[in-house]
Amino acid sequence: MSVDFGDINYLAVIVAAMASLALGTGWYGLFAKPWMEEMGMTPEMASERAAVGARGYVAVGVSWLIAALALSMLVQLTRANGVVDGLWLGLIMGIGLLAASQVPHFSFEVKSLRLFMIDKGYPVTALAVAGIILGVWQ
């Protein structure tokens, strides 16, 4: 079993990464108030953090490209095909690997379940959406 990089649909990887990035904008727009409450931030403090600007978005974009490429490799290796296969693969990565691996950090940092659900709900949802895109586009 191996990945054939020639068979990866790189356009689908880019679209999946861009969808994940766009989802983050909507996600944190929707959950901005509860997220700031959990982080102990004022809107002014959040605006100062957002001043990272393009550098932050480039870093996030690159990380989603890497995640979408990895997910695309798994789609290829598992021969996932279609919405359901892609969704399951994205959820397995999101819940089974990403979210589960972050529980110790949140537990020992004594952060709330609400913050965990906001912060980890975004990448889990983004990976599910990316999985659907890659599964359909396979």
Image (spheres, rainbow, N blue to C red):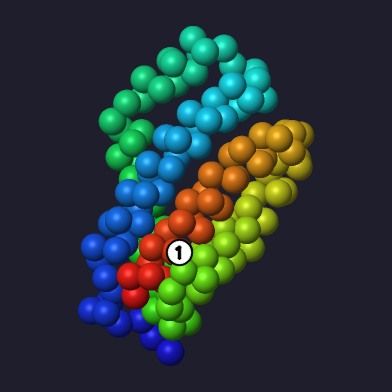
Q: Is residue 75 above or below residue 28?
A: below
Task: Name which residue lies at 42% across and 35% down.
Answer: 25
Q: Nearer the viewer, residue 18 or 58?
A: 18
Specify the amino acid type for callout 1. Answer: Gly
Q: With respect to residue 54, does 101 lie above or below?
A: below
The residue pinned by badge 1 equals 131
Name which quarter of the figure residue 31 lies in.
top right
For the N terminus, give its image quadrant: bottom left
Quadrant of the image occupied by residue 34: top right
Is residue 89 visible from the viewing direction of this image? no
Horizontal relation, residue 130 to residue 7: left or right: right
Quadrant the C terminus occupies: bottom left
The image shows residue 89, relative to residue 52, as above or below, that is: below
Residue lying farthest to the bottom in this orientation: 1
| Front-most of residues 90 and 56 | 90
Where is residue 81? Give x, y as percent. 43, 78
Quarter residue 4 falls in: bottom left
Give the left or right position of residue 39, taking residue 67 as reference. right
